Image: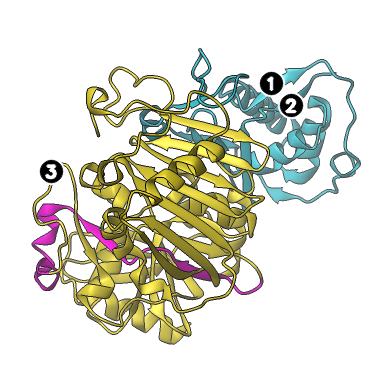
Chain colours: A cyan, B yellow
Amino acid sequence: MQRYVTNPNVIHETIDGETIIIDLATGTYHSLLGAGPAIWDAITAGSTMATVVEHAVRQFDAEPAEVKRAVEAFVQQLEQAELIAPTDAAATDAPEASAAADSNLPFVAPKLETYTDMQDIILLDPVHKVDSRGWPHAAETPAG
Amino acid sequence: MLPASRRPAPSVASGSPDEAAATLFAEASSQGNGVVERSYEIAGRTVLMRFAGSAMFDRISGSFAHLESARLDEPDLRVNIWDTASTGTVAPPILGVELDGDPTGPIYYYEEGDVQALSRWNTLSVFDGHANEAWFWAPDPATMPSWDWASPMRSILHWWLGRHGILQVHGGAVGLPEGGVLVVGRGGSGKSTTTLASLVSGLRYAGDDYVAIETGPSPYVHSLYSSGKLDTHHLERFPTLRGAVVNPVRPEVEKAVIYAQRALVGVSIHGFPIRAVLVPRVAGVPDTRIVATTATAALAAIAPSTIFQLHPPQRDALAQMGTLVRQVPCYSIELGTTLEQIPHAIAELLEEA
């Protein structure tokens, strides 16, 4: 069963139903809106796609088929944005995700907004790590 | 930046940056110019700065003058500061070569054990977290860009304060001893307008661009620098500050710098409790108004530029800033063209908070 892992360069914080995600490597930051934070939480808890969908269906007051389509499309968006990646590791659904209660929350389609204005800072400030010989030898390949 | 051809050859070809810096600072200190020592209280802790000669003291100490302390106790951090131009010592090793097309030059970062080092804008910052000792070097105080000498040693303060759970953020702060506002947003959003407009209003000034915050049960902001920066064309809107500009002759790309403490004695403050977070926006209308905004909007205004301006980015910085915007109310301040209204609006907000 398909499962995803989050990009290790990503940090995230959810406040008042909106998730801010920052990619430390690229300078890109994202905002998740609508049902996005709930889906993100289920994915980062290590759930399989089936459980993510099940979780959302139970959480939101909408046609299951509509929720399923929206979740799958949103997960694809997250993958394209390189915030998550598929993994072959064995599924270990988090109990809290599997045990999601019926909430009947109004369903607002998940939305991913992406901001790239901070990339200017990253591009202006290339950081070069030193190599294994230590200071003051720069590694041959600059690292972001 | 000092052209490569004018750069003194480095004398240390290998080893750790703290050892190299310690050796070179010792040489610089013995050149006959003496050592200037000053204690400062930064974030409630004692920092002893030791300058080899007066050149670097004259260049950067104005930003810390409001934090000067008479405390003689064992410092929590010792910073050794020197330059090559005035001491005649060789430069510490600057890593690698500049990248093509990067006008500010490359940045090199080192981390091994408790030692961190960063070379940027041709200066060198080194921090030994185990010894609580740091070194800051510049090739020539006269060639330092204003954004570096007006907010000096940001990397060292970032690393050191981070070890105490204190986060350096990209934001300003004004208020009163009993409480004030943290002003956050990207460059050009109106942070300096908001904070510098407050200088002559009875509000106290903790900084316009970089301050440090604690996000415990009682969020608190610490002042780091007394400096404030304004674009040349922007300075025209602040006639009372024109006479206080410390770099009246400057390259076109650099901002005018003032020291709040010099511009208005007693206006600077070490810090205060954070009562609210303000996200400024230039409204272009005469009147200023403050309206509620979401915690997420405040987080989006403060987090990316804070995280990406300092190296290495602190993974827990987003969580700390998230804690702050949950703890205090967040507002958008829509900046009007009548500058006098800005501090009055903030003062009214603080009275209600």
Chain where mark 1 sits: A
Query: Which residue is at a point 62% across and 60% down the rendered structure image?
Result: B323
Query: Which residue is at a point 44% across and 85% down the rendered structure image?
Result: B352
Give left or right: position of A26 versus B318.
left
The tag on residue B45 is none
- Name above or below for residue B109 compared with residue B56: above
Q: Is residue A62 visible?
A: no
Q: Is residue B27 visible?
A: yes
**Marks 3, 2: nearer the viewer:** 3
Which residue type carries mark 3? Pro
Instruction: State the CA–CA distance, disc 2 to disc 1.
Output: 5 Å
Q: Position of residue B290 (x, y in %)?
A: 35, 71
Q: Is label 3 in contact with label 2 (beta carbons under 8 Å)?
A: no
Q: Is label 2 in contact with label 1 (beta carbons under 8 Å)?
A: yes
The tag on residue A5 is 2
Instruction: State the CA–CA distance, disc 3 to disc 1.
Output: 47 Å
Quadrant the N terminus of chain B occupies: top left
Residue occupied by mark 1 = A85
In terms of secondary structure, where does tag 2 sit? strand
Q: Position of residue B294 (x, y in %)?
A: 50, 60
Which residue type carries mark 1? Ala
Instruction: State the CA–CA distance, disc 3 to disc 2.
Output: 49 Å
The tag on residue B251 is 3
Query: Which residue is at a point 73% across and 44% down the rendered structure image?
Result: A60
- Name above or below for residue B5 compared with residue B279: above
Query: Callout 2: few (<14), some (14-19), or many (20+) C-alpha neighbours within 10 Å?
Result: some
Which residue type carries mark 2? Val
Q: Please give the range of residues in magenta.
A: B217-243
